[in-house]
Image (cartoon, rainbow, N blue to C red):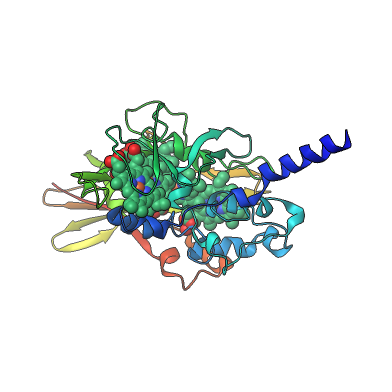
Amino acid sequence: MKKLLLLLAAVAWLLGNDTAHEFAKSAECQACHPKIYEEYYGSMHANATPDKDPIHRAVWDKHPHKNKFEQYSCGKCHSPAADNLDAMLTKEQKALHDPKNETHQEAVSCAYCHRIESIEHGKMSNTNIISKEKLSFYGSTRSSLESPYHKIITEKNDHFANGNVCIGCHSHNLNAHGLNLCSTNVNDEMSTSNCVSCHMPKVDGSFSSIIETKTHSFHGFAGAHTNSDMLKKYVQISILRNIDHFIINVDNQTSHALLLHPMRLAVLKISVTRGGKTEELAEEQFVRVIGKEGKPAMPWVADVTLKDTMVKANEKRAVRRDFKLEKGDKVNVTLGWFLAHPESLKSLGLENEKAAKEFHIFKKESFGF
Ligand code: HEC
Ligand code: HEC
Ligand code: HEC
Ligand code: HEC
Ligand code: HEC
């Protein structure tokens, strides 16, 4: 009996052991997938760690898990290729993020994502189930030939092409008070588009240097930080002129809210040009503020959404300005965002961080009358 228990313990240890959690480095893919590698290298997936993403670092620096030296719980999604991920996610192990550990810097690596076999749904957040073979990758290319370097498991259930592979990390993330910090509305079945078709559109260039293809799926993961111009077409801006006012319509044709992370502040700037002079009208803010006891609070403290004016999935938001337009007037609108709400910069020590404080222009439009 004792032997059996010992054996079971050994098996459990092996299954849960981090040595099985070993991934080919992303740099190893570069030789044969140069375009994909280059795009990926500049994306937030390659840069999701505290050392490479100053915004993530700023929040992590304030986090009680860091300061009580407990665990890097963020690793589950921000550095899932870490060789000691299990320890990172376990309180007693005191395994924090380590800038010197190369596997931590791999962030959301090529091999990690391509070994996601299925998604286990969870209340607090989902979990990726990773395949056991180190060099067998899932993909979506049906006409697959063979790769000299790795095996390819092309899907039976479209798990890659339909975006299911994204929802292990992007579906929801509840804090200890049950507040959902980040929801991507993954259950929306409205459209024929999905995470992959919008965020990884087909672009010119072969996907490998060995087998020529005309296009490949964009691996720069267009989003709020980079390549947002690729997503412009999913948000339409139009204007309706009335006798004593006008209305700007922001039509979000996306299956999720315009921005998702509660740190963001989106702004619609409106001005009117008349006779060579431009007058700024009041701007419109789109924001989701989380907090506690009526005041904005850090994500681990917040237990309620205090305010939510973010443009929702498939919402057409009407913004009215009581301004009488005349013939010859031009109305200029700019939709954009701050990655970190300007009011939070100081408390997060991000005042000098360009990416966090600059206004990122998403879309500009002018309407003449
Ligand atoms: C369940 C997966 C998951 C976990 C766990 C997680 N995150 Fe994230 N995090 C994400 C995803 C997905 C995004 C991108 C969301 C977006 O851009 O809207 C993100 C984005 C962020 C951002 C915005 C970064 C930027 O550059 O704009 C910050 C800050 C952040 N996370 C902090 C943390 C911290 C700190 C932890 C740990 C205490 C953590 N996250 C744990 C999934 C997770
Ligand atoms: C020695 C060259 C070589 C290296 C190195 C290499 N690959 Fe490939 N890979 C290929 C070739 C060739 C194909 C195309 C095979 C085909 O057309 O089916 C391919 C196809 C793929 C596919 C497509 C599967 C599908 O059906 O959609 C994925 C995913 C992939 N590789 C991932 C990776 C990752 C991740 C790495 C790095 C860890 C990597 N590859 C390194 C040669 C390589
Ligand atoms: C292992 C977890 C994980 C998986 C799987 C994952 N992501 Fe992410 N994703 C993240 C994290 C973490 C961030 C935020 C990184 C940061 O800002 O520090 C992020 C950021 C993003 C962003 C924002 C980029 C920007 O410029 O702001 C987009 C878009 C995105 N992911 C799309 C996808 C898509 C599409 C898939 C599926 C093909 C996917 N992600 C799969 C963890 C993941
Ligand atoms: C119809 C196209 C479309 C679909 C489908 C879609 N997105 Fe987006 N996504 C957008 C647009 C538009 C934006 C806002 C512009 C930007 O961030 O550049 C965006 C922004 C994001 C961001 C950045 C938000 C932030 O606050 O930083 C993430 C992360 C993201 N999407 C992930 C996903 C995931 C995961 C899925 C699938 C569950 C998905 N998206 C489905 C179009 C789409
Ligand atoms: C966040 C998850 C994620 C990461 C990280 C990622 N991929 Fe992919 N990759 C995908 C998805 C999803 C597809 C399928 C796209 C489609 O069906 O349009 C794909 C497709 C591919 C293909 C098939 C060819 C094509 O253009 O569709 C290759 C090859 C590939 N990836 C290689 C890589 C390499 C190399 C890296 C790192 C440099 C990488 N991937 C990083 C999710 C990822």
Placement of 122 over or under 16, stated as above or below: above
Q: Residue at x 47, y 34 (%)?
A: 185
Q: Residue at x 37, y 59 (%)?
A: 41
Camera sees residue 326: yes
Q: Quadrant of the N terminus?
A: top right
Q: Quadrant of residue 130?
A: top right
Picture coordinates of residue 236, whole percent (x, y): 26, 41
Placement of 73 over or under 66, stated as above or below: above
Picture coordinates of residue 200, whole percent (x, y): 32, 44
Picture coordinates of residue 82, whole percent (x, y): 57, 56
Report the front residue among 311 and 64: 64
Number of marks: 0
Placement of 29 over or under 173, stated as above or below: below
Picture coordinates of residue 147, whole percent (x, y): 33, 44
Work out which residue is located at the far right of the displayed protein and give it.
2
Camera sees residue 248: no
Report the front residue among 58 and 155: 155
Work out which residue is located at the far left of the displayed protein and give it.
328
